[in-house]
Image: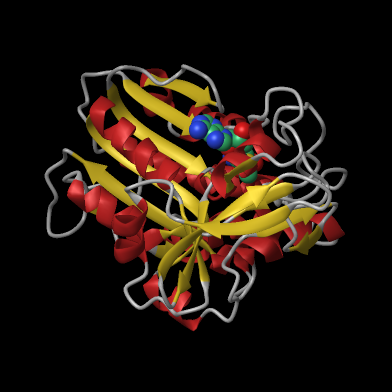
Amino acid sequence: MSSGDTMTFARFMELCLYDPEEGYYRRGARVFGPRGDFYTSPYTHPLFAQVLGDALAGYLSGLDADRPLDLIELGSGEGILGKGVLGRLENQHPGIFARVRYRGVEFGDAGLPERIHGVVFSNELFDALPVHRVRVSQSGLKEIFVRLGEPIAEVEGELSDPRIPEYMRLGFPRWREGCVYEANLRMVEILEDLDRRFQRGFVLTLDYGFEAAEYEAMDRREGTLLCYHRHRVHSDPYVNLGRQDLTSHVNFRVFRKTAARLGWTNEPLRSQRRFLMKWGLADRLLEEENRGILRAERVEDRLGIKALLAPGGISDTLKAQVQAVRLPTAGGSFGAGRI
Ligand SMILES: C[S@@+](CC[C@H](N)C(=O)[O-])C[C@H]1O[C@@H](n2cnc3c(N)ncnc32)[C@H](O)[C@@H]1O
């Protein structure tokens, strides 16, 4: 790359996050937790992985009893969530645990099996994918490109990919002139790739994201792109190159419509908080308190729990989407039971 080179924002974001040597997620530097740049839910409190483990057991128990079960985590990061989930399955759902083949898949791994019978889950994968940025102008849709140099500059031009107009129509039924929107084509590619591999099962996705109405109410004219550096949030992707996280909200309308096009069945989109409550977070909390495990006086414990439970906290902005792939549905539910 040299000064004057021009590229799509998606390519720029991919280099910043996933360049094998200099990319934020691939340099081997600490990313998560107090000494990193941000927290994800598994780092807030162990209860998160435990409740997710119960939910996954519920969905896995609805699948063919006589076959091994794939449990695939996309974007497994440091592996803390997978470890917590497997621990919960082993302790509380040993029958399921004995049949499960877990795989954590990271960027660049060729780790996805050819055939999937089971559950594919992810936490904050899709918001970490490279996105194209599109401005709605008087003369139509214009893509934002990045020109390297001192300083790095944005230039607008014609759309770089024929799939972008369709993505925009699908994702933003009432877009606003002058505003910037993200097109996450990689997200669509991942769902299509999963579809080719799935025999039967579920996709469980936890991520920051919006539905159409939230994009319409949004007051950010420059879109949902955010940068995280040492627990500070800002919106300048052209500083701290390879040293800060870049994310954009998942467009759950596109996510759900793509799934429907593939013949999958969408459960209602929920906030992560409601999803965790549905799968027993409140009961688990009480249990821990009664057993004296939850040290309520400890600040970290209280803050962690608050992050998972507080209305208006991260657990409300985060969403949970479950999709059934090649499964008969019974009265709108997939037969996944609380077990
Ligand atoms: C925000 S982190 C979340 C990590 C972890 N799930 C958690 O909750 O802490 C996003 C992760 O997705 C990974 N990732 C990005 N693109 C990927 C891809 N195409 N396939 C698998 N993992 C990917 C990144 O390397 C990174 O570890």
Viewer can see residue 53: no
Where in the figure is residue 113, as x and y percent of width and height? 36, 18
Viewer can see residue 262: yes
Q: Residue at x 44, y 41 (%)?
A: 186
Please name whichever residue, 178 or 79, is drawn nearer the observer in this view of the structure: 178
Q: Residue at x 57, y 56 (%)?
A: 248
- Asked which quadrant contains residue 233, the reply is bottom right
- Asked which quadrant contains residue 96, the reply is top left
Question: Relative to 22, is 291 on the left or the right?
Answer: left
Q: From this viewpoint, which residue is outermost toward the front? A: 4
Where in the figure is residue 277, as x and y percent of width and height? 48, 62
Q: Split into 4 quadrants, where in the image is the N terminus?
A: top right
Where in the figure is residue 51, as x and y percent of width and height? 52, 48
Q: Residue at x 38, y 37 (%)?
A: 190
Q: Split into 4 quadrants, where in the image is the C terminus?
A: top left
Where in the figure is residue 71, as x and y percent of width and height? 41, 28
Question: Relative to 199, is 305 on the left or the right?
Answer: right
Please name whichever residue, 45 or 178, is drawn nearer the observer in this view of the structure: 178
- Asked which quadrant contains residue 305, the reply is bottom right
Q: Is residue 151 above or below residue 271?
A: above
Question: Relative to 291, is 114 on the left or the right?
Answer: left
Quadrant of the rendered image holding ligand 1: top right
